[in-house]
Amino acid sequence: MIYNPLDTQEIDIIVAGCIQGDSKHRKAFYMLFAPHMLSVSHRYARNREDAEDIFQESVLKTFNNIHQLKDLDKIKWWTKRIVINEAIQFYNKNRKLVFTENYELLQQCEDFQNDIYKNLELEEVLEAIRALPDKMRLVINLYAIEGYSHDKIAGMLNISVGTSKSNLFDARKRIKGLLSNVRREII
């Protein structure tokens, strides 16, 4: 999470300026929240270009809908949610999302606690995740990293709860198998 040195009153002034379309306030908002939004978009995209597309659409949607922001304490969550929704739309349109995340977060998942994975490099883990089918990558990202429930994921992706659970189970199983194969190659 990004440290924000501004207090709520300063953010309120920036948001009010953005609502009025003031370019200085929009730039200030962008400088504060763009790094966080871009990092979220990178987690969903296969490559830098896709992440930038998701990010750019998210920024536009943020400025177009900033008047709907009611609680400044939830501004980071609000911008993150916009990026996630844009990523899902990008996925549905392009069918090429991929889950990427730093290795520390991946280790939090129970399947990554095994000793076999401790010496794996980040790129090896990401390659295993990139090998997953699109829906599996999206479900594991939304569930394991974003913390959404299967009910919420099912609604977001227009699938059943059972399909969400099945995709998560299959994704974890495939990742574990792929990483086991990588580990055997190392030994």
Image (spheres, rainbow, N blue to C red):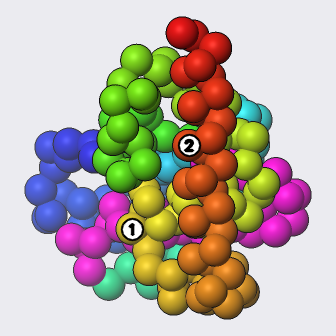
Location of residue 147 in the rendering, given as x and y in whole percent from the top left corner: 39, 68
Residue ID at (43%, 34%): 102
Split into 4 quadrants, where in the image is the C terminus?
top right
Whether residue 34 is in magenta: the answer is: no
How far across and how far down the image is residue 94, in percent?
87, 58
- Seen in the image, is 45 located left or right of residue 104? right
Cα separation between marks 1 and 2: 20 Å
Give the residues drawn in magenta, as a range.
71-99
The residue that mark 2 highlights is 176
Secondary structure under badge 2? Answer: helix
Q: Can residue 45 be seen from the camera position used here?
A: no
Whole-percent x and y of residue 66? 47, 73
**Which percent across, then down, holds residue 172?**
56, 54
Amino acid type of the residue tagged 1 in the rendering: Gly
Report how many numbered discs are placed on residues in the image. 2
Residue at (77%, 57%) from the top-left corner?
A: 134
Please state which of residues 168 and 63 is positioned toward the viewer in this rendering: 168
Residue marked by disc 1: 147
Question: Where is 113 relative to 164, above or below?
Answer: above
Q: Is residue 88 above or below residue 150?
A: above
* Secondary structure mostly seen in the magenta stretch: helix
